[in-house]
Image (tube, helix red, strand yellow):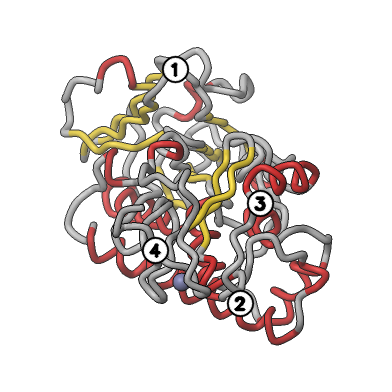
Amino acid sequence: MTSRVGRLRDGRTAPSHTSFAISSQADLRMPELPDIIVYLDALGSRVRGQVLKRLRVFSPFLLRTVEPPIEAAEGRVVVDLRRIGKRIVLCLDAGEQATGEPLFLVIHLMIAGRLQWLKTGAKSPGRIALAMFDFATGALALTEAGSRKRASLHLVRGEAGLAAHDPGGLEVLEADPAAFRAALRRENHTLKRALTDPRLFSGIGNAYSDEILHAAKLSPLQWTSHLSDDEMDRLFAAVRGKLEYWIAELRRQFSDRFPGPGEITAFRSGFAVHGRFGLPCPVCGTAVQRIRHAANETNYCPGCQTDGRILADRSLSRLLHEDWPRTVEELGSDHR
Ligand SMILES: [Zn+2]
């Protein structure tokens, strides 16, 4: 054992298979609510009120709609920006041959999709570029690293078309405690599953759910049906506290510039447990543990969240087979 291995409350050290890598999650970086909000802030000041002069789609996998044709978006003014869950929406005006209905460009970054803001006339970022949106103020590049092309773009007509993209999760920052409890009680799931289910809660994914559960001192494996009112209130306070903190923090960080592609990440210095497997919990010093399931990894502190118990990785993975976000697609995307 090295001195870096944290001690559990009862004096046992963390198991010897503990390592200090965060690489197992390195490809799981789906932007979540705070990340999407800073993108919307950065985009708003650059494209709101601007004409979308040209829209070039480079990847055959990106565009998921055929009607209206993508050219219909060109020449329209971006009148507003919105967020639906983890999606970014450019709201376009009704255009010249007014059909009376606005159009909406719905961007889902999924895991590796990112935005870049470039100077007018700048070259596209090469092979990773999926699309370029040209404005008089500059160009928005949508990029995706890696070979799995998951990011998506939909062009939809009218509010009804847009509504079909809403998984329906509660907007936790606008909700009161009663609405939060109701959403938690709607189905019986592990807390990890419930928080990251976009049909139940909007915008929370793998990273922030770990941070929220740590702040609430609740196990990721606790069943929602077993939560006391007191625990629900603690969880609600943690959800709001963590999201509001990180939104403010990222806004401060990106107040004067567009976030770079490598800066929208699920690993932030300042996180207590997420991405910190094997490192000491900043609250109690216990080594942060993990539960792996399929492509996902949950990090938690045994000292703060599970009365010192280490949740056996393999057996829990089996136990959780039926109640875990099994794929990255399921973890926050297209429940429709
Ligand atoms: Zn702790």
Q: Which mark is residue 209?
A: none
As shown in the figure, which amino acid type bears the numbered disc 4? Answer: Gly
Q: Count residues near mark 2 (Cα–Cα under 10 Å), then give few for <14, some for 14-19, many for 20+.
A: many
Name the residue at 62% across, 43% down.
331
Name the residue located 46 percent from the left edge and 47 percent from the top edge: 16
Q: Mark 2 falls on what kind of element?
A: helix
Please give the name of the residue rendered at 75% of the width and 47% of the height, measured from the top-left corner: 320
**Measured along the vertical axis of the image, is residue 189 above or below residue 60?**
below
Residue 83's x, y, as percent? 51, 53
Please tell me which residue lies in front, 108 or 184: 184
Return the residue at label 4: 6
Q: Amino acid at mark 3?
A: Pro
Proximity of marks 4 and 2: CB atoms separated by less than 8 Å: no
Instruction: Name which of mark 1 and mark 4 comes first in the sequence.
Output: 4
Distance from disc 4 to disc 2, alpha carbons, whole Å, reads 29 Å
Discs 3/4, front: 4
Circle 3/circle 4 CB separation < 8 Å: no
Which numbered disc covers residue 198? Answer: 3
User: Gap between marks 1 and 4, in whole Å?
Assistant: 37 Å
Q: Does residue 140 lie above or below 48 as drawn?
A: above
Viewer-closest of 310 and 242: 310
First in sequence, mark 4 or 2: give its number: 4
Between 138 and 3, the residue placed more toward the observer is: 3
Q: Is residue 17 left or right of residue 233?
A: left
Give the amino acid type for the residue marked by disc 1 in the picture. Ser
Callout 3: SS: loop
Quarter placement of the C terminus: top right
Q: Nearer the viewer, mark 3 or mark 1?
A: 1
- Say which mark, if any, is on residue 236: 2
